[in-house]
Image (cartoon, coloured by chain):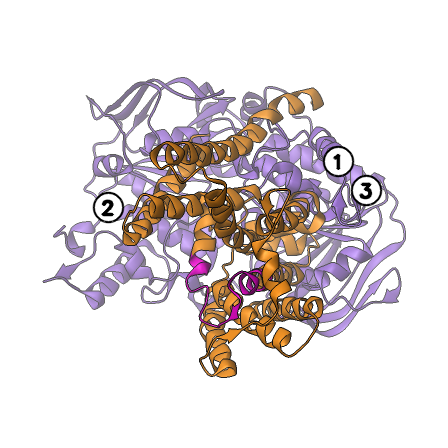
Amino acid sequence: MTSTAQELHPAPTLEPGRTILELKGLEKQYPGTHALKPVSLAFKSGEIHAIVGENGAGKSTLIKLLTGVMPRTSGDVIWEGKPAALATPHEAMALGINAVHQEVVLCRHLTVAANMFLGEEDSRFGILQQRAMVREAQKIIDDLGFDLPAHVVLGDLTIGQQQLIAAARATVRGTKFLIFDEPTAYLTRKEADQLFTLIRRLKGEGVTIIYISHRMEEVFELADRVSVLRDGTLVGTRNIAETNDAELVKMMINRSIEQVYHKEHFTPGATLLEARNLSGKGFENVSMTARAGEIVGLYGLIGAGRSEFVTTLYGRHRKSAGQILWEGKEVQINSEHDAIRLGMALAPESRRDQGLCLNLPVGLNLNLPIYKRISSNLLISSAQEKTEADRQIANLRIKTPTRNALASSLSGGNQQKIVIGKWLAHGARLFIFDEPTVGVDVGTKAEIYRLFGELLSKGAGIILISSYLPEVYELADTLHVFRRGKLVATHGFHTADHEEILTQALAEKQEKLGGQI
Amino acid sequence: MSTEAIAAEKPKRNYNALFGLTLLALLVLLWVILSVATPSFASTNNISNLLRQGSMIAILAVGQTFVIITGGIDLSVGAVVGFATVIAAMLINAGVPVILAILITLLVGVAIGLFHGFGIVKMGLPPFIITLATLTSLRGIGLLMTNGNSISINNDAFQLFSRSSFLGIPNLFWMVILVGIPAYVFLHHSRWGRYLFSVGSNAEASRLSGVNVQRTIYMAYTLSGLCAAFVGVLLASRIGIGNPTQAEGWELQAIASSVIGGTSLFGAVGSVHGPLLGAFILATINNGANLLNVNAFWQRIITGVLIIVIVYFDGLRRRGK
C-alpha cells in the first residue's frame, strides 16, 4: 500500500441521480429465521435514503449484506451496472461502500489521526509519517467544520466526538456509498448538526447516503426518500415530501400508534428519596425529591452531570457534600448494595457495558438481582428460577426463543427490556432509568413507557434521565434541567415549552467542543 | 410461552451435555486404542496408576476453572502445591497430628488465595501479574524454609493413604469425587456459582445488579488456593517428601485441562465435569505415550496439538450454533 494521505481526499463529484446500486431479490436466511425476505430496491447517487423499522426488522441484516460482513442467501446486487459479489468487507470497501456504526468501532488508544488513516498509513521507507498524517487529518477535520484536535488520543474525546471522527474517516476513502447506522444515538444536538452538515455536503458531492435512525424528525430533516422494513420485509419506499410521521409509524408497526407517550397522572405519594445540596464528581449542589407515583425527569446534554448524579445516589460514587434522605431519614449509601437494599434500582445508560451479561442466558440476567430471594442456604431453587424468568419474559414480551438463549442474541430493544425487567421481580420502589430508549424503536419505546405507568400505579417512583427532550417532556411530572453539573431549572408537567427548556440546557452556545477535552 | 420455552430449552442442554459426551468418548476411545496397542495398559496396576496421575491435576483444574470463569487466571497453583508439600512435611515431622497438619496446610492455601483476591480487588493488579508474582516468590520462600533440601516425611500412615484403594479405586481418585461433587453443586446450583459467571461476563452489570463483585473474586481465588493446597497434601502423601520445587508447570497443565474441558479464557463459560475429563485425557496421553515408548518430548508436543484441536472444534461449534 503506497497510498499517501494526499490521495485520501473526498472522492470526485459523482453524477447525481444515476442508479448506483440495485438490489434484486436480496435475501438472508439463518437457520430458523428468515432475517431478510427478498428485497428489491435501487439507490441513486447523491440521494439520502433513510431506512426505518423496528428493532429486528432486518435493518442490521441489510447493512451487513451491503458491507460484505455476511454473505447473502440469494438475490443479486448490481453495482454501477455490474453484478457484485459483496462477499467480503474488503470488496465492499474497494467498491466504495462504507459504514459508520452506532457504536464507534475505532481504536480508542490511538490518536485521532492514526485512526483516520488506519490501514492506509502514510509511510516512507517503512517509517510512519506521523506529523504529516496529523497535519493531513487536521486539515480534513477543519475542512469538515469539526472543531476537534487530530493529535489527541481518540478515547479522550466524548462518544459524540468519536462518532464525528468515525464519520470523517469514512469520507476520506473514496466513498461513493455511505451507510450511517443510528449515528446520532449518542450525539448532542450540536454534534448532530455538524454531522448533518457533513452528510448534506457528501450528498452534494454525489455520494449515496443510507441513513438509519429511529428518530423520525431526523429522517424528515435529512432524507430524500425513506424505505420501511418490518419483520424482514420491505413494506414500501416513499418520497419524503409525500409521506408523514403517522404513515411511516403505521407502516413500521402495522398498527396505528395512538399515543407513544401514554401518560397517566397519579397523585404523588410519600417522598421516597431526597437529595439535599448534594455534590460529587461531575455535579454540585443538587437538591431534588422523588415521590412515589411520579416521574422525575432529568434533562440535559450528555455530560451535563445527570448520570454522575444518579450513580452517586446509587452508591457507585462517593458524594463530596450534602445529604441523601430515604423516606425522610438520612442514609449513607456507600455501595450499590446499600442502594438496592433501600429499594432503589438502576437501569444504566449503556446496556452493553453496564446493563447486561451478554454471553449469559436471558434467564440468568433477569434473575441476577433476586438470586438471594430464590435460593435458600445458597442453593438456588431451579423451579423458582425458571418461573421467575418466564414470568418476566411473558410480562415484558421479550422476544426470545427461550430463557436459555444468550442475551447477545437478542435485538437491542429486547435487551433493553431485560435491563429494565430484572428489577421488576426485585420489588424495588424507586427506579432510575438512564437513557432507557436509546437505540430502541417506537414499538419498544411504547412498551417501555407502558411499563413506567405500571410501576407508578403500583406505588413506585421513577427518575428518568434522557437527552431526548420529547421523551422527558411528555412523561415527567417534574422536570429538572441540568447544565454543566448544575441543576439550572425545574418545571412541572408541560409548564414550559421545548424552546425554553432547550435554551436552559444549552445556554452557552459559544462553548467549544474541543474545550471539553 | 412456557411450553415453547421448555421445548426450545433442550438444544442448549444437549449442547453442553454433547460436549461433555464428546470428551468422554475421546477418553474412552483413547483407552480402547491403548488397550489394544499395549498389553500393559488395561492392567489394574496401570489403570490405578493413571487415575492417580490424573487426579491431582484434575483437582487443580477445578479450582483453576472457578478463577477462569470470572475472567481471571491463577498461575500460582503449581507453586502452591510445592509450597504446601513443605508446610505439610514440616508440620508432620514436628509431631503435629496429621489431621491438624492437613487443616493448617489447607488454611495456608486459603490465605494465599485471599492474598490474590486482595491484590486484584484492592491493589488493582491484573490476575496474571499477582499470581505470577506468587508463583516465583512462593518457590523462593519454600527454598528458604528448607535450605533447598527435600524433607522426608516420617509418617507411614500419612503416606499409606495415597497408595491405598477403597472399593478397588485408588484413594486419590476418591478425592476427585470428594472435590468434584460439591464443586458441581456450588458452580451450577448455588447463588455464588451464578455470580462467578455473571462477574466473568460483565462485572459492572453485576455490580449494578447488587452482586458483591469483590467478594466473588476473593472467593474464586480462595477456592483455587484451597484446591492447590489440598493437592499439595495429596502429593506429599504420595511422594513422601516436602519440596518446594515440586509440581513445576502444573499450573499450565491445570489451565490446559480446563481449556480442553470447554472453559473459555474470556470468562463466563465453564463447567466442573469438563476440566475433570480434560485432566484425565491429558493423563491418558502421558501414560499411553510412556507405555508406547514414545519419546517424552513428544508428549509435550501432542498435548499442545490436542489443546489447539479441541479448542478449535469447540469454538467452531459454538459459533456455528
| Lower sequence index among marks 3 and 1 | 1
| Lower sequence index among marks 1 and 2 | 2
Label placed on residue A173: 2
Q: Colour of chain A?
A: purple
The magenta stretch spans residue B235:
yes
Q: Which region of the structure is painted magenta?
A: B230-252
Q: Amino acid at mark 3?
A: Leu
Nearest the eye: A42 or A418: A418
Q: Quadrant of residue A125?
A: bottom left
Q: Amino acid at mark 1?
A: Glu
Mark 1 burial class by Cα count in 10 Å: few <14, some 14-19, many 20+: some
| Lower sequence index among marks 3 and 2 | 2
Chain painted in orange in the figure: B
Residue A350 horizontal/vertical position (percent): 57, 50
Q: Is residue B76 left or right of residue A497?
A: left
Label 2 marks a residue whose chain is A
Label placed on residue A388: 1
